[in-house]
């Protein structure tokens, strides 16, 4: 796109409209330096999705590991949806196991009630895991 008569060559700019500037900056920094700086929950979620989209396997893996290590009630539902959406069985299992270890706190939360409304199948799958482990 930068060598033919395309818009990007003429404008000398590539517009990545589906990603935030910070996510693109972090992704390019990783590609060129192998560095992840100041990774936080929200930026890790966005960077994980971008890495999957652009098939940057090592970045996706590092973001997935970060998300697994930083699971908490505040980000759990987002991580579970992300893992399911991107077909990441390891991250999904980690999120579901976290839920099962903290079932009282999670299942009684308002966040889980909202999650059920938007992700009924995924919620049912997770609750079935709990039932199977207890029986």
Image: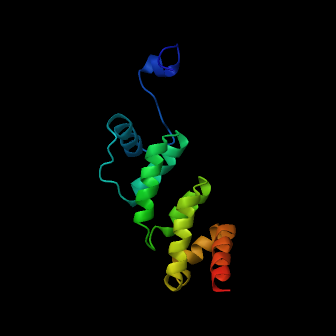
Residue positioned 57% across, 62% down in the render? 81
Quadrant of the image occupied by residue 20: top left
Residue 60, image x and y in percent? Answer: 47, 48
Residue positioned 68% across, 74% down in the render? 124
Q: Is 69 on the left or on the right of 82, as rendered?
A: left
From this viewpoint, which residue is outermost toward the left? 38
Quadrant the C terminus occupies: bottom right
Q: Is 62 on the left or on the right of 6, as rendered?
A: left
Compared with residue 128, is residue 60 higher up or lower down, i.e. above or below? above
Residue 120, image x and y in percent? Answer: 68, 70
Compared with residue 6, is residue 77 higher up or lower down, i.e. above or below? below
Residue positioned 48% across, 22% down in the render? 8
Residue 64, image x and y in percent? Answer: 46, 55
Taking depth in this image into account, of 84 and 6 the one nearest to the observer is: 84
Compared with residue 133, is residue 13 higher up or lower down, i.e. above or below? above
Residue 91, image x and y in percent? Answer: 53, 60
């Amino acid at each position: 796109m930068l060598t033919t008569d395309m818009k990007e060559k003429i404008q000398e700019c590539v517009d990545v409209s589906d990603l935030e500037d910070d996510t693109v900056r972090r992704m390019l920094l990783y590609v060129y330096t192998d560095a992840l700086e100041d990774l936080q929950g929200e930026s890790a979620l966005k960077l994980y999705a971008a890495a999957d989209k652009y098939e940057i396997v090592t970045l996706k893996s590092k973001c997935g590991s970060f998300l697994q290590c930083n699971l908490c009630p505040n980000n759990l539902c987002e991580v579970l949806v992300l893992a399911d959406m991107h077909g990441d069985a390891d991250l999904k299992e980690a999120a579901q196991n976290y839920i099962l270890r903290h079932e009282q706190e999670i299942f009684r939360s308002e966040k889980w009630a909202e999650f059920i409304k938007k992700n009924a199948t995924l919620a049912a799958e997770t609750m079935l895991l709990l039932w199977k482990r207890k029986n």
